[in-house]
Image: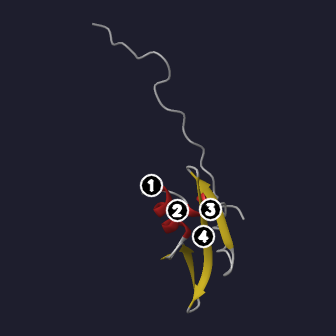
Amino acid sequence: MPETKPEGPATKTPTPKTDKPRTRAKAAPAPKAGTVLEREYKGKSYRLTVTSENGAIAFRLGKKKYSSLTEAAKEVTGYASISGPAFWGKANA
């Protein structure tokens, strides 16, 4: 019985290689203490205040304190995976 060959390209097109290492975009700097970030989500307004406690940046949302924008965004949305800087509008600030 004669051997059959598959139609079309037999191999994937190789991905071009570069000498450049992959790099991630640099994170936006943390907002300064005293900054107030406001966001409306599902019809409710949220006000996040940036504070400095013992030299460390913290975020206050109502009476609760958070250590990151992402932690505060997770609390507001209920999503386990969300970008805090993008949610609060500081992704490319």
**Dot 3 and dot 4 residues touching (CB under 8 Å):** yes
**Dot 2 and dot 1 residues touching (CB under 8 Å):** yes
**Mark 3: secondary structure:** loop
State the CA–CA distance, disc 4 to disc 2.
Answer: 10 Å
**Mark 1: secondary structure:** loop
Q: Earlier in the sequence, mark 2 or mark 1?
A: 2
Q: Which mark is residue 79?
A: 1
Q: How many marks?
A: 4
Q: Residue shown at 50%/60% (left/top)?
A: 76
Q: Earlier in the sequence, mark 1 or mark 4?
A: 4
Indicate the position of residue 31 as horizontal and vertical percent values: 67, 74
Would you say 39 lies left or right of 72 here?
Answer: right
Q: Earlier in the sequence, mark 3 or mark 1?
A: 1
Residue type marked 3: Trp
State the CA–CA distance, disc 3 to disc 2.
Answer: 7 Å
**Mark 4: secondary structure:** strand
State the CA–CA distance, disc 1 to disc 4.
Answer: 18 Å
**Observer-nearest residue: 1 or 8?**
8
Indicate the position of residue 71 as horizontal and vertical percent values: 48, 68
Of circles 3 and 4, the one toward us is 4
Can you identify the residue that label 3 sits on? 88
Residue type marked 1: Tyr
**Dot 3 and dot 2 residues touching (CB under 8 Å):** yes
Residues packed near mark 2 inside 10 Å, few (<14), some (14 to 19) or many (20 plus): many
Q: Which mark is residue 48?
A: 4
Q: Earlier in the sequence, mark 3 or mark 4?
A: 4
Q: Residue shown at 55%/49% (left/top)?
A: 42
From this viewpoint, which residue is outermost toward the left?
A: 1
Residue type marked 2: Ala
Q: Residue shown at 50%/23% (left/top)?
A: 9
